[in-house]
Image (cartoon, helix red, strand yellow):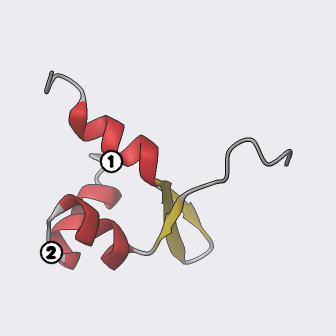
Amino acid sequence: MNGDKELDLVWGVQAIADIIGRSYQQTYHMITTGKLPMVKQIGERYVVSRGKLIAFFMEGAA
């Protein structure tokens, strides 16, 4: 990595839930049913780029 832009990754369902203002269970359901397609599963954990997650919710909010 050349240092131009650091990865801003959010690890875990609870951390993702905190960002989107939902409960753990609501967020887990959204992830497992494909409602948050940018969230990836790595092993037994979920991870997402904070920027992509925020951009997803800001689409159409302009």
Residue at the limit of the structure toward the right, as seen here: 2
Question: CA gap, disc 1 to disc 2?
Answer: 14 Å
Q: Residue at x 27, y 46 (%)?
A: 35
Residue of label 1 = 36
Indicate the position of residue 24 as horizontal and vertical percent values. 22, 77
Quick one: label 2, few (<14), some, or many (20+) residues within 10 Å? Answer: some
Q: Is residue 24 left or right of residue 16?
A: left
Q: Is residue 27 above or below residue 58?
A: below
The type of residue carrying mark 2 is: Ser
Q: How many marks?
A: 2
Given residues 6 and 10, the one toward you in this image is: 6
Quarter of the rendering containing residue 17 = bottom left
Given residues 10 and 31, the one toward you in this image is: 10
Quarter of the rendering containing residue 38 = top left
Q: Would residue 28 be seen by someone viewing this image from the given angle? A: no
Residue at the limit of the structure toward the front, as seen here: 4
Sequence-first disc among 1 and 2: 2
Residue of label 2 = 23
The type of residue carrying mark 1 is: Leu
Q: Quadrant of the C terminus?
A: top left
